[in-house]
Image (cartoon, rainbow, N blue to C red):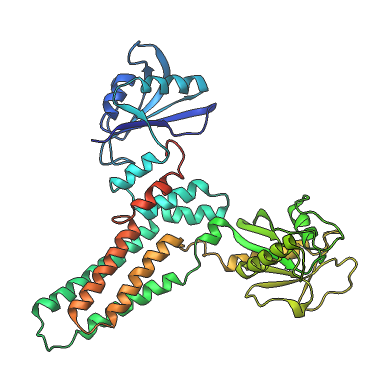
Amino acid sequence: MSDTIFALSSGRPPAAIAVIRISGPQAHATGERIAGSLPAARSAAVRELRHPETGELLDDALVLRFDAPASSTGEDVIELQGHGGRAVVDAVLAALTGIDGLRPAEPGEFTRRAFENGRIDLTEAEGLADLIEAETESQRKAALALAEGGLRKQIASWQERLLALSARAERAIDYDEEDEAVDPALVRDCAALAAELQAWLERPRAEPLKDGVLVVVAGLPNAGKSSLINAIAGEERAIVTAVPGTTRDHIEVPLSLGGVPIRLTDTAGLRETEDEVEAIGVQRAGRLAEASDVLLWLGDDEAAPHHPRLLRIHAKADISGAAPVDSLAVSSLTGEGLAALLGEVERQARAVLPAEDAIALNRRQAAHLAEAEDALSTAAEGHEPVLIAEHLRVGRAAFDRLTGRAGVDDVLDALFGRFCLGK
C-alpha cells in the first residue's frame, strides 16, 4: 500500500487562496480528522479546519473530496482550499505532518502517481512538465496539446492497427500452408502504417519550440555583430570595441518574438588567428553557425556559408552606403531596419517550429516512434509470417516504451524531478 502524501499545490504564500492536496489510502480519514464530515464525492463544502490533536481552529476552508479511481492521481484525494496567508498555510501543513502515516510529497509525486495508476501516460506527463515550464504562447499551446492527450490518442490508434496486423500474422502462422506466400494485403498494410509513422517523424520537432530557435549572428571581425546583439537586446550584452577579435566566446540572449522563443547568439569573428583563445572561439562560432536554425550573416556575400535560412545583413547602414539587393540594411546606431530584421527573423523561426495546431514529438518520443517505424518497414519486407510477426512484436514493444508502459524506469526520475512540489 502506498503512502499518503500531502503538499501545498498553489503558489507560495502569501496569496488569496492556498490549495493543499492530500492523496493516498488515508486521505479521506485525514480529511475527517481535520475537517470533520466530508462532502459527497466530487462535491465541495465549507468546513472549519481544526488541529486533530488539540482541536484548535486553523482556518475556514472549502473542502473537496475525490474517490479512487476517479481522481487526478487515481487514489482517494482531499483538497483543502483555504486562506493563503503564510501562517495559515504553515499551521495546516504542521497539523498534517503530525498525523501518523502521512508524509510531505516529493516534487512531481502527485503526477507520478497519476501515471503509475494509469490516469495519464508518459506523453501526457511530459506535456504537463512542459506546460509548467512554458514561457511563450507557442510553448503553452504545444505543451497543452500533449498534456490533454493529443499524442496519446494518436498512439492508441496506431497500437490498435498494429495489434490487428499482429493478429493477422499470427493467424497466418497457425493456418497457412508452408508453401503459401505471405498475404500481400498484410505486407501492404504494414508498409502503409510505416509510411504514416515516417510522416510524423518528418514533422518539426519540439526541441526548437521548447529550448528556443537558435538564431546565430556570424561574420567577419568588426562587422557589427555585437552592436547588433546589443541593439536587439536593448542593453549592453556584448562588448563592443574597434579591436578585431574582441568577442572570443559566444553570448546567448533569450528573446520572444511574437510568442516565438529565440536564442539570439553572438559569435567570434570568423578569421585565421594565432591567438589560442580566439581560435577556440572561432571554432565554436563555426560549429554554432552550422547548427543554427536561422543564420544572420554580416560580411561579404562571397564568404557567406551555405545555410537553408540565411539572412544577409548590410550592417552599419548609416555609414556604409546602399545595401545589396538581397541584404537587409540595418543600423545598430540609429535603429534603421531593426523592426524589419526582427520580423524576418520571426518568419524564418516559425518555419522550423511545428504549427500551433500540430503535435510535436520530443527527442525521446521520436526515438521510440522511429523504432516502431523501422520494425514495421522491416515487416513489410518479410517473406515469412513468423518473421513478420516478430518484427510486429518489436514494434508493439516500441509503442509501450513510448507511452511508458514498459522500459522507461531510467526516464521517470528525471522527468518527475522537473515538477514542483504539489504537482
Q: Is residue 324 visible?
A: yes
Q: Nearer the viewer, residue 275 or 133?
A: 275
Residue 134 as seen in the image, left or right of residue 100? right
Q: Is residue 392 above or below residue 258?
A: below
Residue 420 as seen in the image, left or right of residue 410? right
Q: Is residue 399 above or below residue 385?
A: above
Q: Residue at x 50, y 67 (%)?
A: 204
Q: Quadrant of the N terminus?
A: top left
* Residue 186, position as x, y percentages in the image: 23, 80
Q: Is residue 335 above or below residue 40?
A: below
* Residue 358, position as x, y percentages in the image: 47, 63
Q: Quadrant of the C terminus?
A: top left
Residue 162 as seen in the image, left or right of residue 90? left
Q: Residue at x 30, y 24 (%)?
A: 30
Q: Nearer the viewer, residue 399 or 279?
A: 279
Q: Nearer the viewer, residue 300 or 246?
A: 246
* Residue 267, position as x, y percentages in the image: 71, 62
Q: Quadrant of residue 263?
A: bottom right
* Residue 241, position as x, y percentages in the image: 85, 57
Q: Is residue 343 visible?
A: no
Q: Quadrant of residue 154?
A: bottom left
Q: How many marks?
A: 0
